[in-house]
Image (cartoon, rainbow, N blue to C red):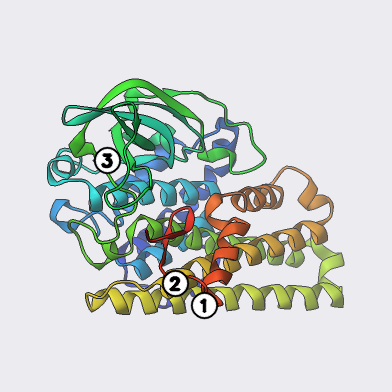
Amino acid sequence: MIHNTDLLSNHAEWPLLVEAKRLAPFLASKAEANEAAGQVSQESISAMRDAGFFSLMVPSEVGGMDSNPVEVLSIVEAMCNIDAATGWVMMAANVATASAAGFLPDEGFQALFGNGRPVVAGAGAPTGKAVVEGDGYRLSGRWSYGSGCLNSDFIHAGAIVYEDGAPRVLPGTNTPEARIFIFPTKDAEMLGNWDVLGLRATGSVDYAVTDLFVPGEFTHLPSEIVGKRGGEGFRIGVVGLSALGHTGFALGHGRHVLDELAKLAQSSGGRDLAGSDAFKQEFAAAEGKLRAARAFCYEVWNDVLETISQGEAVALRQFTLIRLALSHATTVMMENSIFAHRVSGGAGLRAGWLQRAFRDSLSATQHLVVSDKALRDCGHDLLGFATDMKWTPRGLVNVS
């Protein structure tokens, strides 16, 4: 269930926050079985799909929620507060689904979203090779960390475009052209190699395709910032969508960690914690760090919302603060998880929620979007050295 009413206090009227509260007991009850199965149950996926959780940023013209970034942040936070892996799958699939909904050409958009609510998932890193063929591409490659792909209808995969035997470069640059390719999940081979420390229920297996033809209308550039359709939420680009989702995860899961630790302290099994002044002091400090990180994240995203609501472009410094807030929230989540593991003793060592929370937290910190490089790039801009640079999903790059 949702463990802290603060998550609902500011925007309790948002329909999906109400739905999150309704579904919380059911989704939480599946967490242990999901981990054993290595993926989120189909019952959980169906419940979230029916409620609209996989259509957060799909345009309203095809029945989507068309949520703005602050709404998305609140909803992802609430879902990750229920269960880390379930929330992670919902979050990751929304990044890929929103990317397709906002940036595919019109023909591809209508084919995917005109008659239903598809779940798109996968990995955008350009590890594939796409050879130009007529109006489309022959795609081959293997991709890792395809969170949610076992529960998806379509796959989202990145690749470098080749033409006449060599990488095609973006006009006016020396940069090889990378594109996102969308194709039916049934066309991919799922390699089933998700044997990891944490987030086991996300089913983030590797997948592969060989010589698959993908029509041009089912591809888009990952560097696009302003969507071809939809509301102001599509003015943050793929780079903003990814950071937004991971921020919600860090805040929601971080909240759950402290709430579970408090429950342990209040129980008969937590007598030693309840009587420890040192624990009380450290717990208060952990609570303060989480609330401060959350305030910073919402400050940044409310500022972005104000900018895009006025039809203005998100500035470089705003993207820097987006990534800085994400890095900070993830660090706080990790530090608080280590604290919870350290003080919980045998309760945290044995199988159960505290152990799983610790493993899930450490696994989440390994994602590229919260790497040390991202924090170094933030420092580069904050020190005034990012002239003629822009943010991409993989960090700061030169404009030319």
Give the distance between the C-alpha atoms of the residues marked 1 and 3, in whole angstroms. 42 Å
Give the distance between the C-alpha atoms of the residues marked 2 and 3, in whole angstroms. 40 Å
Give the distance between the C-alpha atoms of the residues marked 1 and 2, in whole angstroms. 7 Å
**Residue name at image x 47 percent, y 48 percent:** 26
**Quadrant in the picture for residue 70:** bottom left
User: Label 1, on which residue?
Assistant: 384
Point out the tag, 2 or 3, that comes first from the N-terminus. Answer: 3
Could you say whether the residue bearing mark 3 is in a helix, strand or loop? loop
User: Label 3, on which residue?
Assistant: 118
Three-letter code for the amino acid on which mark 3 is drawn = Pro
Q: Position of residue 208 (x, y in %)?
A: 43, 25
Q: Is residue 40 visible?
A: yes
Q: Position of residue 321 (x, y in %)?
A: 48, 73
Looking at the picture, tell me which residue is in the foreground, 3 or 195: 195
Looking at the picture, tell me which residue is in the foreground, 4 or 214: 214
**Residue name at image x 50 percent, y 30 percent:** 206
Q: Position of residue 98 (x, y in %)?
A: 30, 52
Point out the tag, 1 or 3, that comes first from the N-terminus. Answer: 3
Three-letter code for the amino acid on which mark 2 is drawn = Thr
Relative to residue 50, is residue 370 depicted above or below?
below
Q: Are marks 1 and 2 in contact (CB under 8 Å)?
A: yes
Looking at the picture, tell me which residue is in the foreground, 167 or 132: 167
Q: Which mark is residue 387?
A: 2
Three-letter code for the amino acid on which mark 1 is drawn = Gly
